[in-house]
Amino acid sequence: MPRISAPSLAEHQSRQRARVIDAALELLAEAGVAGVTPAAVGERAGLSRSSLYQYVESTAQLVALAATLAYERRARALAPAVTMEEWVDRLLRFSRTPAGRAVVALERAVVPPECRAAVEEWRAEQREPLEKVLRERGESEEADLARLYEALAESAGRLAGVARARSLLARMLGPLEEK
């Protein structure tokens, strides 16, 4: 019989499920959607493949749970940002985390339309503070500009360290804040 690693069975199951979702997120970041298999997630989480199904129903659910966790972490990373510069800096930092890499993997993946719609809804909610700043600056087409800043910051954050990425973005775009 397996050991219970918590004071109660319910807490043990909750911890195990969290380990499964974390493992799925790591694999999504490392290998994309194709890397999130029950066998790989089970191995990463320290569970047999058959035990894994006590916590999730399918591969699709594993990917969905990892995606939800990635976007929840992205929301927490971006939410405190008030200025455009803060938002971009936070996105640069986030893009270097496993959750940040998972977000990019989801962007590149071929997923069902309902999944794509959920991903775009999450991204749109998280771009709203940036769009607000752009509107306040009098920019037209703030939604498209925000998408462009988002894509550039995510790419730059993955390719270079945060300070270097910030410098490159400033050279390309000029200062982010009005002086």
Image (spheres, rainbow, N blue to C red):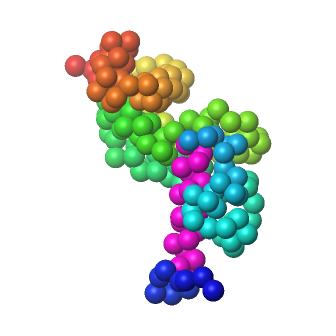
Q: Position of residue 98 (x, y in %)?
A: 48, 45
Determine the image quadrant of residue 39: bottom right
84 with respect to 30 (left or right): left
* Residue 127 in view in this figure: yes
| Location of residue 109 by image quarter | top right
Task: Please tell me which residue is depicted at 57% across the width and 62% down the height of the picture.
Answer: 45
Q: Is residue 108 left or right of residue 148?
A: right
Q: Residue 127: horizontal and vertical position, in percent?
A: 48, 36
As rendered, which of 159 and 46 lies closer to the eye?
Answer: 46
The vertical placement of 177 against 120, above or below, is above
| Magenta-drawn segment | 10-29
168 displayed left or right of 63? left
Does residue 175 sit above or below 25 in this rendering?
A: above
**Total marks placed:** 0
| Left or right: 128 as drawn, with respect to 92 | right
Task: Give me the residue at 57% from left, 58% from top.
Answer: 44
Q: Position of residue 17 (x, y in %)?
A: 58, 68
Q: Is residue 15 magenta?
A: yes
If the image is split into quadrants, where does the C terminus sit?
top left
Magenta highlight on residue 92: no
Q: Chief secondary structure of the magenta span?
A: helix
> Height in image: 175 above or below 9?
above
